[in-house]
Amino acid sequence: MRIRYKPMRLGEIALISEYLAPLAVHPGAFGLKDDAALLTALPASGLVITSDGLTAGVHFFEDDDPGDAAYKALAVNVSDLAAKAARPLAYTLTLALAEAPTGEWAQRFTAGLARAHSKFGIALIGGDTVSARGAWWMSITAFGEACPRGLVPRGGAKPGDLLYVSGTIGDAALGLKLRLHGESFGSLLSAEEREFLRSRYLYPEPRLGLAAALASEASAAMDISDGLALDLSRMCEVSRVSAEIVVSAIPLSDAARTLAAAGADAMQTILTGGDDYEILAAVPPERASGFEAASRKGGVPVTRIGTVSAGAGAPKFRAAGGLELELCSKGFEHFKV
Amino acid sequence: MRIRYKPMRLGEIALISEYLAPLAVHPGAFGLKDDAALLTALPASGLVITSDGLTAGVHFFEDDDPGDAAYKALAVNVSDLAAKAARPLAYTLTLALAEAPTGEWAQRFTAGLARAHSKFGIALIGGDTVSARGAWWMSITAFGEACPRGLVPRGGAKPGDLLYVSGTIGDAALGLKLRLHGESFGSLLSAEEREFLRSRYLYPEPRLGLAAALASEASAAMDISDGLALDLSRMCEVSRVSAEIVVSAIPLSDAARTLAAAGADAMQTILTGGDDYEILAAVPPERASGFEAASRKGGVPVTRIGTVSAGAGAPKFRAAGGLELELCSKGFEHFKV
């Protein structure tokens, strides 16, 4: 005889006390047994604060491992801290579920948080669990110790500054496309390359190693979450400048390079697709060598991709021969008219 | 000829720049044009941090005015600060919408935030706008200046302490019932009384005036959000104590008193219904007169409802003659097994 067990489901109190509280070892978290958290010994330089929400079916797939989704939720928040040259300290999590989770779900979810804690050096200090109506969602608010100058602003780019990006651009958007359109899209790639692109979408890598370089040398910085083209245009708009990008200089992974060589579509995806979580930085020319040296010291590859220019026009993407590339869309907006 | 205009809908960028940014006047908000906010001149006593999420159809009605929902979202977060004797400073807001809002929706929503700003002395410093899949939702993280002792803990109640509540208990839960079950339920009440109960559900009043009394005199405090019975049992559990409540001492509004006199159901709702956002405090007997005086000075009525007792049993609710009242449920949990 085979007995089928109904998977055990957890109430709100059990989810918090059995699964989340053991992660909340920070003294200001009070074991998640109080109404609020307390941060003391606050940094004299200030506290950098960022909030990001993630919805199942929008920011990650409904059938993703909940631990991967939790890891990504923390990574995208920590990426904002990294872009501002802040050192991660703590975060609060609001978690909304449409139904009581199973113990297995809670175990996977908290395992993803734990992976992120040890990788990013950040601590859970509080939050809330509530009901969702529809897809499940998370909202995280992350706190970081500001660098001595406060934060590296988005709006500080000056004409003549050099524009740098970290890592390689477009992998996550190609990984998402690969996942959405199946194997046909990736038939040009090896199994390893397909796996590489998929993991770039699933596991963003906040560039915390760039903090010292940004803090001491950059005039402006932000993370690239909604696509290089859109986020660069945002930096330019706030800084009241424009920019010229040399498309051939944009650093690509081998997998992205293979796809870009095979057709123009991939290049559109690379320039306008989201989820890179690399850093875009503007650096005065006289600080370029210092920035590059500090980036190397931090273990983060950076590449110069263009220059900040005067004026208020949209940034220009120059292909070989100086021709301007026309982009079909600028990038990802959550709701458009 | 009549022309029907399609209501203008706002993209994500317009919602932020035209409606939310004008509210973000705090210098650390950078006009919502950066990736993160910066809090400087941080309080030496520490920063009290609380997060609360609200989902349409769960925490408020889908057809509520979006400004009322926004006001409530801020009020429930500020209520946690008030319970910890913290002074509100700033907050971040994650707002998730299933479709692009109209200008009218955005106007109503931000008007509700603005009402809360001026009432609670709190400032918008950052956040995120994302897509919802299903009902729209908000998650707020609020920051307050800690009182000199840090925060008034939930877990500090000692046997012999007197238990106090602010205001009146159960009005919001009765207001919700009135709204759900229409006029029949409230036929015993005047129109003014019905309106009073409804507004107690819609507009929670964080008891910020109680901060000085809590900071100097209370051994434990929390806000009552999920019902007096459940929240008291939580305070007792964390404090490793029990409690005896004199049901006849629980302060009721005239409307609640009328309904309680008419049937036992209303009393169950009063003791176990959520959304009061009054304060529950434990006060050592020798500090009771100081607590009462400081509460009067803060303009917040408080009433003694019982005593903290030794032991680990569930709190007892004693009716007239000392009989223990049996509660059908303890209060509101977001997901139960």
Image (cartoon, coloured by chain):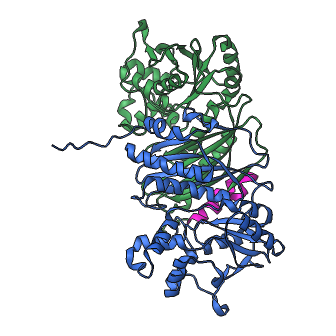
Chain colours: A blue, B green
Residue at the outermost bottom position: A321
Q: Is residue B15 magenta?
A: yes
Specify whether residue B247 is painted magenta: no
Q: Nearer the viewer, residue A112 or B220?
A: A112
Q: Nearer the viewer, residue A34 or B247?
A: A34
Query: Is residue A294 among the parts visible in the rendering?
Result: yes
Relative height, residue B1 to residue B65 (above, below) = below
Residue that sits furthest to the right in the current view: A286
Residue found at the far top of this picture:
B321
Residue at figure coordinates x 51%, y 56% from the top left: A54
Q: Position of residue A5 (x, y in %)?
A: 26, 42
In the shown orientation, is residue B58 left or right of residue B309?
Answer: left
x then y, percent, for residue B281: 59, 22
State the image coordinates of residue B24 (x, y, percent, origin top left).
69, 53
Instruction: Please tell me in which quadrant of the rendered image residue B106 appears.
Output: bottom right
Q: Position of residue A4 (x, y in %)?
A: 23, 44
**Part of the protein shown in magenta:** B11-33
The quadrant holding residue A165 is bottom right
Question: Magenta part mainly helix, strand or loop?
Answer: helix
Q: In the image, is residue B315 above or below residue B222? A: above
Image quadrant where one finds the C terminus of chain B: top left
Q: Residue furthest left?
A: A1
Quadrant placement of the N terminus of chain B: bottom left
**From where the camera sits, is residue B25 visible?**
no
Tell which of B254 and A74 is nearer to you: A74
A252 relative position to A188: left or right: right
The number of discs equals 0
Q: Quadrant of residue B87?
A: top right
